[in-house]
Image (spheres, grey):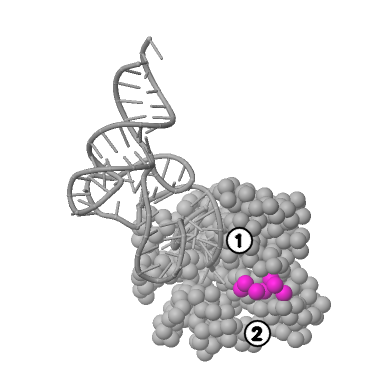
Amino acid sequence: MSELFSYDIVAEDPKTHARAGVFHTAHGDIETPVFMPVGTKGTVKGLLPQVVEGLGAQIVLANTYHLSQRPGSDLIEELGGLHDFMQWHKPILTDSGGFQVFSHGEFFKLSNEGVRFRAVDYDGSWVSWTPEQNMAIAQQLGSDICMQLDQCPGYPATRGFVQRAVELSSMWAERCWKAHTRPDQALFGIVQGGMHLDLRLRSLRHLEECGDFPGYGIGGYSVGEDHETMFETLAPLAGEHMPRNKPHYLMGVGNPTTLVRGVACGVDMFDCVLPTRTARTGTAFSSEGRLNFRNARFRRDDGPIDAACTCPVCTGGFTRAYVHHLVRQHEMLGSELISMHNLYYLIDLMRRARASIIEGTYSDFVDDWMASPAAIDY
RNA sequence: GGGGAUGUGGCACAGCGGCAACUGCGGCGGACUGUAAAUCCGCUCCUUCGGGUUCCUUGGUUCGAGUCCAAGCAUCCCCA
């Protein structure tokens, strides 16, 4: 029942592909569907770990690439691993850094061995990675879930380019699978294939052939395509073709409406920088849609960020006028309060989705959501 | 009373003969999706979009003046 890295399906919605489950890791169980806050450099920006936990976060992300640059995986290993280093004792998922490499445009070179790229966000020096080296770093960090090294094509991209990315990612998946030995860490494969269902299925097939991955990432979405384009292939992929007994992790997504719809497609895990990044620039999710707290209309607004929200900020007496003031004055607390609110918003959304799936009423949940003002902006 | 300095768009500060006028702040709005992001991008004199009216004021020099000259007004500093 609670074997490490097993995924137990608790309930399935009768009318959609939504599932509620539990994924077991060395640092505790993860109840799905779940939203995972992003803490790239070993911190969810601006928030203490206990605050993140208090918001209901079950797992956070960190990034292999960034942490290998600074402060270095050797150092983190020496200091007892990433959990101790960042004082987060629940599960951690590390992304490989493949996304970073390929989102840096012209600053990378592929070879049979691996990838060579410039650490443009640090000192600009060239870094070489093989899938084996990438796994070695992830294992030093000691995350509970690590992602294979993959190639994430952008959008638009030619079919040929996407196909080559699938082939390379498949090859790397196999090498990652063979190189990965840490027993208390789960390695997830990543399905690529852009907006082509046949390539997606081919990618999935390759992964299933090369190893028994305990979970699957779905990469290469939310890279510039519109939402409907994504759902055209995501829905059949996650809903019908991906193995039922493994978690389906839609990487880098996203906004509240996409989460609600993604769950209906059979997605179990999400991560996104959107709640924390937009928070730092003054934008809050709300039941009224997105709110930009730099706007003058909040100057005298003595209500909470979202009257329908039960987060510590909205129930803590902090007014829109105060948040507006903090944001305008570039006070750190403004970023922090909205980050808390936004993270809670998505975490709680998934918690409510889960309850609804267990009740067997998720299709109503989706309908209600889509009819609400909260769905408008996305 | 004597000497020196300065007056530019909401504020601060550029500009040294071709200017609707640099830059910063402020103001208004937008973006943000496996974080190169407490960041980035617009707009910010009036306009019937042709143009119009500007750089303390008034004269003057010049094809042309925010920029040069004169006077006035105002402000600041130093010495009495």
Q: Residue at x 74, y 56 (%)?
A: A303
Position of residue A230 in the picture relative to residue B5 (left or right): right
Q: Earlier in the sequence, mark 2 or mark 1?
A: 2
Packing grade of label 2 (10 A; few <14, some 14-19, many >=20) is many
SS label for mark 1:
strand
Chain to which mark 2 belongs: A
Q: Nearer the viewer, residue B30 or A230?
A: B30
Chain to which mark 1 belongs: A
Q: Is residue A375 magenta?
A: yes
Q: Nearer the viewer, residue A276 or B6?
A: B6
Q: Nearer the viewer, residue B79 or A113?
A: B79
Q: Which residues are magenta?
A: A372-378
Q: Residue at x 48, y 51 (%)?
A: A71
The quadrant of the picture occupied by the C terminus of chain A is bottom right
Mark 1 lies on residue: A292
* Coordinates of residue A131 in the picture (x, y in percent): 45, 69
Above or below for A15 versus B42: below
* Coordinates of residue A81 in the picture (x, y in percent): 57, 54
Above or below for A38 versus B66: below
The quadrant of the picture occupied by the N terminus of chain A is bottom right
Q: Nearer the viewer, mark 2 or mark 1?
A: 1
Mark 2 lies on residue: A239
Above or below for A13 versus A46: below
Callout 1 amino acid = Asn
Q: Residue at x 77, y 55 (%)?
A: A315
Packing grade of label 1 (10 A; few <14, some 14-19, many >=20) is some
Residue A295 is drawn in which quadrant? bottom right
Residue that sits furthest to the bottom in the current view: A198
Pointers 2 and 1 within a single chain: yes
* Coordinates of residue A231 in the picture (x, y in percent): 59, 83
Callout 2 amino acid = Gly
